[in-house]
Image: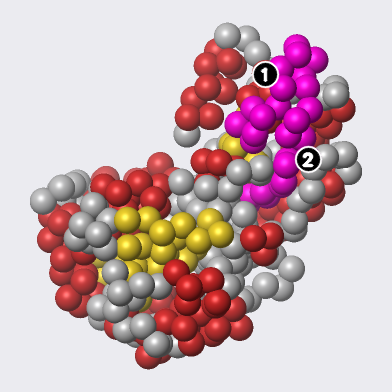
C-alpha cells in the first residue's frame, strides 16, 4: 500500500508510473454480484446484522466449504469479518498470550508478523529457501512448547507458491505429533491456480487436525471484491466464539450490503473465472519470460495467485547511473521506481531480502511496457 501511495503521488506530479504493487485484480466485480447489492439496498437491508454474519451467508459458507473442500462445519462455527484479514487478526488477538509463538514461513504476507506482535505474541520466522514452501523438517525444528499457531498461506502472497496435497500431508504428519499447535490456513487465493495445480487445504488432507485448524477465505481476490471488505473464518466452536466476541466489541458486523453481495457470489456461477484465469496465466507467463531474459534477474513460475517474486540478489553491489551503490532489494525497488517508473515491492517487506514482488493483475500492455523499462534500467547498472 505504501508503494502504491508513492506511485500515485508520482503520477499526480505528472510521471508515467506503472503500478505493479497492488494486490488486487484489475477486473471489475461481476455484474450479478453488484446487482445483488443494489437489490439489497432497495430492500432496505441496511441495518446491523449479527456480529458474526447473517444466518443466510454463514449457511452458504458451510455449503461452499463442504462442496469445494470436503469440510464439515455448522453455521455457528463461521464468523464473517471485514475481510479475511480481520478474521486472522481477531484469531491471533483473541488467543495469544505474552510469549506465545507463531510460526510464519517466509516469504510471508506483510501483516502476519505485525498481527502477532499486536497480540503480544512472538513471530517465529522460518526460512523456506528457494522452494518458497515450508518443509517438514523446518517445521519440526521450529516447534517449541510455546508454539501456539502456524500460519500457512497457499497459494502464497507474495510468491504464488502453492502447497500440494503431498506437501500438506508431510506437514500434517509433523503437526499430529504436537497437539498444542493450531493452524491458520489462509486460502484467499484458492480459485486462482494454473497449469492443473490442484488446490488443497489442511483440514481436507488430515481430518484429525480439524479441531485445530482455522480455515480462512473470502471474496476479495477470486471475485474482485477487495473494496467490499468481506471474508470469513471457519473453525472449532470454542475458538469461533472468542473470535466473534472480539469482533462484537470492535467493528461489530461486516457491511450488511457486502454480506448480501457475498451471498450472491456463493450462490452464483464461477464461470467468469475461466476467462480471468486464462488472462492471469497469460500475464504470468509473459512476465516470467521477460524477467528471466534480464541479466541479473531470476524468476520462478508460481502455481497460483497473481504475483511473481523474482530474485534480484545479483544486482547488489552494482552502481546506478547517478552513482548510487545498490546495497539491497530496497535500493533495487527505489531505483526501479525512480529510473524505470515501475512500482514494485521489495522482498524485505515480506521477510525475504534479495527479491521483489510484481503483481501481474494489470493489462498485458502495461506488463509488456513495465518489463521493457525494468530491462532497460537494469542494463544501465554497472
Q: What residue is disc 2 on?
A: 314
Q: Residues within 10 Å of mark 1 (few under 14, many from 20)?
A: some
C-alpha distance separating marks 2 and 1: 20 Å
Question: Quadrant location of the C terminus?
Answer: top right
Q: How many marks?
A: 2
Choose top left, top right, bottom left or bottom right for residue 364: top right
Q: Is residue 318 above or below residue 301?
A: above
Q: Is residue 257 above or below residue 296?
A: below
The residue under the point 46% across, 57% down is: 125
- Whether residue 54 is visible here, answered yes or no, is no
Q: Earlier in the sequence, mark 2 or mark 1?
A: 2
- The residue positioned farthest toward the top in the image shown: 13
- Is residue 354 shown in magenta? no
Q: What residue is disc 1 on?
A: 338
Q: Is residue 62 above or below residue 110?
A: below
Query: Element type at marker 1?
Result: helix
Give the magenta range.
306-331
310 or 304: nearer the viewer: 310
Q: Residue 44 — which label?
A: none
The residue under the point 78% across, 40% down is: 314
Q: Nearer the viewer, mark 2 or mark 1?
A: 2
Percent across and percent down for residue 48 are 14, 51
Percent across and percent down for residue 217 are 41, 63
Q: Residues within 10 Å of mark 2 (few under 14, many from 20)?
A: some
Percent across and percent down for residue 1 are 47, 34
The residue under the point 53% across, 71% down is: 138
129 or 228: nearer the viewer: 129
37 or 158: nearer the viewer: 158
Amino acid at each position: 500500500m505504501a508503494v502504491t501511495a508513492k506511485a500515485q503521488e508520482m503520477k499526480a506530479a505528472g510521471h508515467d508510473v506503472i503500478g505493479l504493487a497492488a494486490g488486487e485484480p484489475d477486473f471489475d466485480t461481476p455484474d450479478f454480484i453488484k446487482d445483488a447489492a443494489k437489490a439489497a439496498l432497495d430492500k432496505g437491508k441496511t441495518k446491523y446484522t449479527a456480529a458474526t454474519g447473517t444466518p443466510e451467508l454463514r449457511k452458504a459458507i458451510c455449503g461452499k466449504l463442504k462442496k469445494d473442500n470436503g469440510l464439515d462445519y455448522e453455521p455457528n462455527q463461521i464468523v464473517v469479518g471485514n475481510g479475511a484479514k480481520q478474521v486472522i487478526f481477531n484469531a491471533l488477538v483473541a488467543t495469544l498470550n505474552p510469549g506465545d509463538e507463531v510460526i510464519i514461513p517466509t516469504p510471508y504476507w506483510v501483516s502476519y508478523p505485525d498481527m502477532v506482535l499486536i497480540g503480544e505474541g512472538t513471530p517465529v520466522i522460518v526460512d523456506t529457501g528457494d522452494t518458497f514452501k515450508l518443509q517438514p523438517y523446518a517445521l519440526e525444528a521450529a516447534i517449541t512448547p510455546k508454539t501456539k499457531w502456524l500460519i500457512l498461506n497457499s497459494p502464497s502472497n507474495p510468491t504464488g507458491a502453492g502447497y500440494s496435497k503431498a506437501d500438506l500431508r508431510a506437514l500434517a504428519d509433523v503437526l499430529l505429533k504436537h497437539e498444542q499447535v493450531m493452524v491458520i490456513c489462509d486460502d484467499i487465493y484458492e480459485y486462482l491456480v494454473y497449469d492443473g495445480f490442484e488446490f488443497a487445504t489442511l483440514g481436507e488432507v488430515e481430518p484429525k487436525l480439524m479441531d485445530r485448524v482455522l480455515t480462512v477465505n473470502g471474496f476479495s481476490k477470486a471475485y474482485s471484491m477487495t473494496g467490499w471488505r468481506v471474508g470469513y473464518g471457519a473453525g472449532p466452536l470454542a475458538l469461533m466464539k472468542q473470535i466473534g466476541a472480539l469482533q462484537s466489541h470492535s467493528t461489530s458486523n461486516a457491511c450488511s450490503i457486502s454480506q448480501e453481495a457475498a451471498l450472491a457470489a456463493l450462490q452464483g456461477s464461477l464461470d467468469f473465472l475461466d476467462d480471468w484465469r486464462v488472462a492471469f496465466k497469460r500475464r504470468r507467463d509473459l512476465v516470467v519470460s521477460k524477467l528471466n531474459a534480464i541479466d541479473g534477474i531470476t524468476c520462478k513460475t508460481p502455481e497460483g495467485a497473481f504475483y511473481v517474486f523474482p530474485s534480484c540478489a545479483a544486482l547488489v553491489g552494482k552502481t546506478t547511473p547517478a552513482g548510487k551503490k545498490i546495497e539491497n532489494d530496497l535500493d533495487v525497488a527505489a531505483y526501479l521506481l525512480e529510473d524505470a517508473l515501475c512500482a514494485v515491492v521489495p522482498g524485505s517487506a515480506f521477510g525475504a531480502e534479495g527479491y521483489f514482488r510484481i503483481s501481474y493483475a494489470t493489462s498485458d500492455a502495461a506488463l509488456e511496457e513495465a518489463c521493457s523499462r525494468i530491462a532497460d534500467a537494469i542494463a544501465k547498472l554497472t
